[in-house]
Amino acid sequence: MNTLHRMCLGLGLAIATLGNAHAAPVVGSGGGYFGTADYGNGSGSVVGPYSTWAACNNALQAAINNAVNNFGYTLVSMHPCSYTPPYAGVMHQHFELAVDSENEGDTADVAAVLLDQVKRIREAHHADAYDAAVGELVLITDPLRKRDRPKK
């Protein structure tokens, strides 16, 4: 009977620890700018997390250029870099841009033109300032940050 009790206790502890395996990451991890690219052969690129949109955009363009120019992939669509808050999935994207080109070899050039247009739109609407302000709001409202809590 003693062996049976130990087995049940061990099994119970093992099951109890499984619930913690899916716990949320610590505050401040997981958030940032992510971008993705999908290629004609079913593969893709994911870049991020980056602390700024510009760093993410540069990494996404480099990933696309590498895949198209070095591996011969054809870019089919991409999700330009966008901010993904902590605890959200990587595929939390705001929009997708289809890349259509008559010549399979120039999809990286088409992607560069599209990403440059996204950059111009962000600059025209001061998106970096907006993102910074939202980031500050997230830090202020984080319930686990003791220094920002009002004193009781």
Image (cartoon, rainbow, N blue to C red):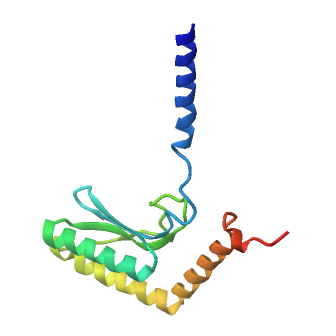
Q: Nearer the viewer, residue 70 or 8?
A: 8
Q: Nearer the viewer, residue 109 or 143?
A: 143
Q: Residue at x 26, y 55 (%)?
A: 42
Outermost residue to the front: 2
Residue 73 is situated, as x and y percent measured from the top left of the image, at: 19, 65
- Please determine whether, in this image, residue 152 is positioned above or below residue 112: above
Residue 6 is situated, as x and y percent measured from the top left of the image, at: 54, 18
Residue 13 is situated, as x and y percent measured from the top left of the image, at: 56, 29
Outermost residue to the right: 152
- Please determine whether, in this image, residue 72 is positioned above or below residue 59: above
Q: Residue at x 22, y 57 (%)?
A: 41
Where is residue 35, by image quadrant?
Answer: bottom left
In which quadrant is the C terminus drawn?
bottom right
In which quadrant is the N terminus drawn?
top right
Disc tally is: 0
In-image side of 29 versus 74 (left or right): right
Q: Residue at x 30, y 72 (%)?
A: 99
In-image side of 149 versus 123 (left or right): right
Q: Nearer the viewer, residue 63 or 25?
A: 25
Q: Nearer the viewer, residue 26 or 122?
A: 26
Residue 51 is situated, as x and y percent measured from the top left of the image, at: 46, 76
Q: Residue at x 58, y 15 (%)?
A: 5
Outermost residue to the top: 1
Query: Can residue 113 be seen in this snapshot?
Result: yes
Query: Can residue 101 be seen in this snapshot?
Result: no
- Please determine whether, in this image, residue 20 is positioned above or below residue 62: above
